[in-house]
Image: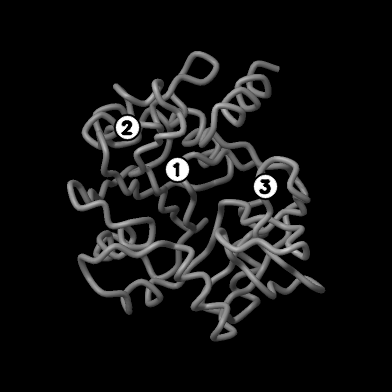
Amino acid sequence: MLPCVVLCGGLATRLYPLTEQVPKSLVQVDGKPFLYHQLRLLQSQGIRDAILCIGHMGHAIQSYGGDGSEFGVRLRYSSDAPLRLGTAGAIRKALEELPPIFFVLYGDSYLQCDYGAIARSFHQSGKQALMTIHRNDDRFDRSNVEAQNGRIVRYDKAVRTPEMQYIDYGLGVFNRQTFAELPSGQPVDLQFVYQNLLAQGQLAAFEVSERFYEIGSPEGLRDLERYLAR
């Protein structure tokens, strides 16, 4: 299975005051830090190697995760503190740790999908990257993807249109070269990378039917807590 880059460096201001003293990855969910649940999920999907891109209070994440042996996933770390390089900039910073092909997972996402099928779809596509999408219709968050016949037509988190019925699910697959082309040490958002790949015809899509869970908002945190408690 492909290794996974997990983006854990955000400030998580929407979860204040929960995240004033702990990073979002260590917020308690059903009695354990969220990172515990996330890593055990990755392990159950066959992922054995993960690179955590840390920043804000990253020392606490590294102290908790250690070498990953507790979770069955070998962990490595790359920190962009105190620069805050953004989601894509943090991946660019971790370039020396990255394999040729890898998953990228948002650090607040809990995604029960078929990671193996997603990896196979990426390889079959011949593209530089793949974005997973979900038919959301503004149910769990604001939709930001317009897709037609399994192909992404438009992706924008800031400028939404009525045709955007799908959402960026939170899991991508990338070729390492995509990030090697970014400027080193400068803030770059992953949205920019996705949009640039889309404009070049180099972004594949994989539609996921399972709903996503996330802890990026108080509502999302409550939803995941209820789900895990069941």
Question: Does residue 100 appear left or right of residue 131 in this picture?
Answer: left
In the image shown, does 228 or 156 lie closer to the viewer? Answer: 156
CB under 8 Å between discs 3 and 2 = no
Q: In the image, is 84 to the left or to the right of 39?
A: left
Q: Secondary structure at mark 2?
A: helix
Q: Amino acid at mark 1?
A: Gly
Separation of residues labelled 3 and 2 (CA atoms): 23 Å
Q: Residue at x 65, y 26 (%)?
A: 223
Colouring scheme applied when the structure was drawn: one colour
Amino acid at the residue labelled 2 = Gly
Q: Is residue 225 above or below residue 84?
A: above
Tell me where residue 75 appears, x and y as whole percent. 33, 43
Looking at numbered disc 3 in the image, what kind of residue is underneath it?
A: Cys
User: Which residue was labeled with disc 3?
Assistant: 113
- 34 relative to 181, above or below: above
- Which residue is at the far left? 82
The residue singled out by tag 2 in the image is 65
Across and down, in percent, residue 192 comes to 45, 69
Residue 122: x %, y % from top left: 60, 70
- Which residue does the numbered mark 1 point to in the structure image? 107
Is disc 1 surrounded by few (<14), some (14 to 19) or many (20+) residues within 10 Å?
many
Asked whether 195 or 104 is in front, the reply is 195
Q: Earlier in the sequence, mark 3 or mark 1?
A: 1
Would you say the residues marked 2 and 1 are in contact, meaning their CB atoms lie under 8 Å apart? no
Could you tell which of marks 3 and 2 lies nearer the N-terminus? 2
